[in-house]
Image (spheres, rainbow, N blue to C red):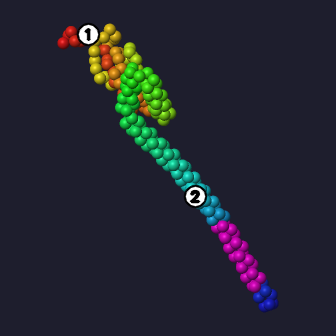
């Protein structure tokens, strides 16, 4: 009988061991599942952070490219602004030479038009200002005020050409603006 009790005891120990083993396996499996979920969550967080970082970098690159283009545009505008007095004098010289020597004037006019077309290709354009237009301080510079048959605030004549570079004013048109005769009489 003792042998039976001993076998029963050993059998009971084995069952307990088996239970502990099963419990440990279940516990490990539960921990493994939690670890897998934690790992999935951690991976998802890293992926999201990486995507955000990529988007921020793309935005940074676009911003830098835009700044570079703006810098290039401003540098070109400054250079073209320096050419404008030369352009004015070149135009006057062409007109004067044409009066004295039409053939030489034609040759100079060809050079002038080639130079002007090169500047236009780069984004320079002349303002279209004429007598009777309203004075606009964003486009025009009033160099003189004079009495005229035109309404007050209208342009009497253009004294200096104005220029735009890619739509932005780089030199205001110098104009003579009409003034009201009645204001002078009241003074």
Residue at left 43%, top 43%?
71
Residue at left 72%, top 73%?
22
- Viewer-proximal residue, 180 or 111? 111
What mark, if any, has residue 181 been given in the picture? 1
- Which corner quadrant holds the N terminus? bottom right
What secondary structure prevails in the magenta region?
helix
- Res. 185 image quadrant: top left
Q: Residue furthest left?
A: 187
What mark, if any, has residue 46 been given in the picture? 2
Residue at left 73%, top 77%?
18
- Viewer-proximal residue, 96 or 45? 96
28 left or right of 50? right
How far separated are the C-alphas under marks 1 and 2?
A: 77 Å
Q: Residues within 10 Å of mark 2 (few under 14, many from 20)?
A: few
Residue at left 31%, top 19%?
176
The x, y position of residue 79, in whole percent, is 40, 39
Q: Which residues are magenta?
A: 9-32
Q: Is residue 23 magenta?
A: yes
The x, y position of residue 65, in whole percent, is 50, 46
């Amino acid at each position: 009988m003792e042998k039976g009790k001993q076998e029963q005891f050993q059998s009971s120990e084995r069952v307990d061991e088996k239970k502990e083993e099963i419990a440990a396996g279940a516990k490990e499996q539960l921990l493994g599942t939690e670890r897998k979920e934690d790992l999935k969550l951690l991976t998802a967080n890293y992926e999201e952070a990486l995507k955000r970082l990529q988007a921020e970098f793309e935005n940074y690159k676009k911003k830098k490219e835009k700044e570079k283009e703006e810098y290039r545009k401003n540098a070109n505008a400054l250079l073209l602004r320096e050419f404008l007095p030369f352009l004015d004098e070149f135009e006057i010289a062409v007109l004067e030479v044409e009066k004295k020597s039409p053939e030489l004037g034609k040759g100079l006019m060809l050079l002038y038009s080639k130079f002007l077309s090169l500047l236009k290709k780069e984004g320079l354009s002349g303002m279209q200002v004429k007598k009777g237009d309203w004075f606009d301080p964003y486009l025009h510079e009033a160099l003189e005020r004079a009495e005229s048959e035109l309404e007050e605030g209208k342009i009497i004549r253009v004294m200096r050409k104005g220029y735009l570079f890619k739509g932005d004013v780089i030199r205001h048109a110098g104009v003579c603006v009409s003034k009201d005769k009645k204001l002078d009489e009241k003074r």
